[in-house]
Amino acid sequence: MSSGFDDFTEAEYRRLLSMARDRWRFITCEEAFGDVSNAAVWRHDVDFSPQRALRLAEIEAEADVRATYFILLTSNFYNALESSVAKAIRGICERGHGLGLHFDPGLRGRRLPDGMSIEASLAFDRRILEEYFGVPVAAFSYHNPTTVDGALPDVDTIAGMVNTYGPTIRERFSYVSDSNGLWRHRRLADVLEAAGDSRLHVLTHPEWWTPEPMSPRDRVTRCIEGRSRRQHADYDELLERHQRPNVR
């Protein structure tokens, strides 16, 4: 496991994309079930920062690479339906990237009627994303699945969406993840340089990829404080625009 903070910068992300594009063809989660080789499922779970996600989407579009961004409707760090966040998500879609559902099974009992199945909950969240953003949602990923009591359905599709942790993708593709701001299995640069895997499943979280190196905790702080500044600016701008008093 590598903990080198220098790995997680915009400049390094550009380099990794270039390396990957030279060897692998970027495919969607739905395409992973076909007869594919030298292919990469390249996706992002947006846990903290849609703004960082938009920045990665811009970098990928510049490199002529398409990825899938999985949006969490129950995040404590952003509201996917508020105007500034929705604008960032639409910006991701406008650059040709796919939209997926990031689904937290641990929140079901607190947010939906008791007894609602995971399939019904997935369908519920999918419908919100599709109707609000006007794009198809063909795949989902679990958020923090290891924190859930009991087993989650280990199947390839649920509620008409591809399960990114289903058995087919899990068995056919070599997995690389930057969860918690660390390389959890193998360092992506090492995997790309070795070029020994015919099929790759690469998961990144946009909040870790910043202009300058910093610790994972500091990157989370950056997301929180950036959101706070935007909310204060929105409040001040609204009052100024409508000539209302702004008592401080």
Image: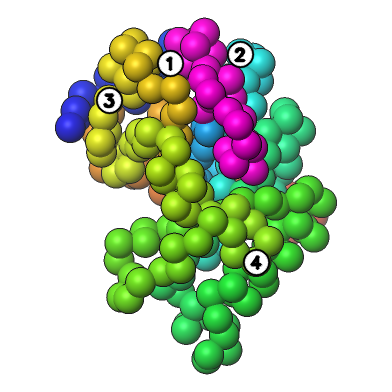
Q: Earlier in the sequence, mark 4 or mark 1?
A: 1
For the residues bearing labels 3 and 4, Cβ distance under 8 angstroms:
no
Q: Which residue is mark 3?
A: 187
Work out which residue is located at the far bottom of the displayed protein and give it: 114
Picture quarter containing residue 76? bottom left
Q: Nearer the viewer, mark 4 or mark 1?
A: 4
Q: Which residue is mark 1?
A: 16
Q: Which residue is mark 4?
A: 159
Magenta residue span: 17-40
Percent position of residue 91, x then y:
71, 35
225 vs 238, left or right, is left
Q: CA distance from mark 4 to mark 1?
A: 33 Å
Q: Is residue 59 above or below residue 27?
A: above
- What's the amino acid at mark 4? Ala
Q: Nearer the viewer, mark 3 or mark 4?
A: 4
Q: Is residue 245 above or below residue 190?
A: below
87 vs 248, left or right, is right
Percent position of residue 104, x then y:
47, 65
Decide if residue 236 is in sight here: no
Q: CA distance from mark 1 to mark 3?
A: 11 Å
Front in this rendered view, residue 111 or 159? 159
Picture quarter containing residue 207? top left
Percent position of residue 201, x then y:
45, 34
- What's the amino acid at mark 2? Ala
Decide if residue 150 is in sight here: yes
Q: Nearer the viewer, mark 2 or mark 3?
A: 3
Q: Earlier in the sequence, mark 2 or mark 4?
A: 2
Q: CA distance from mark 2 to mark 3?
A: 21 Å
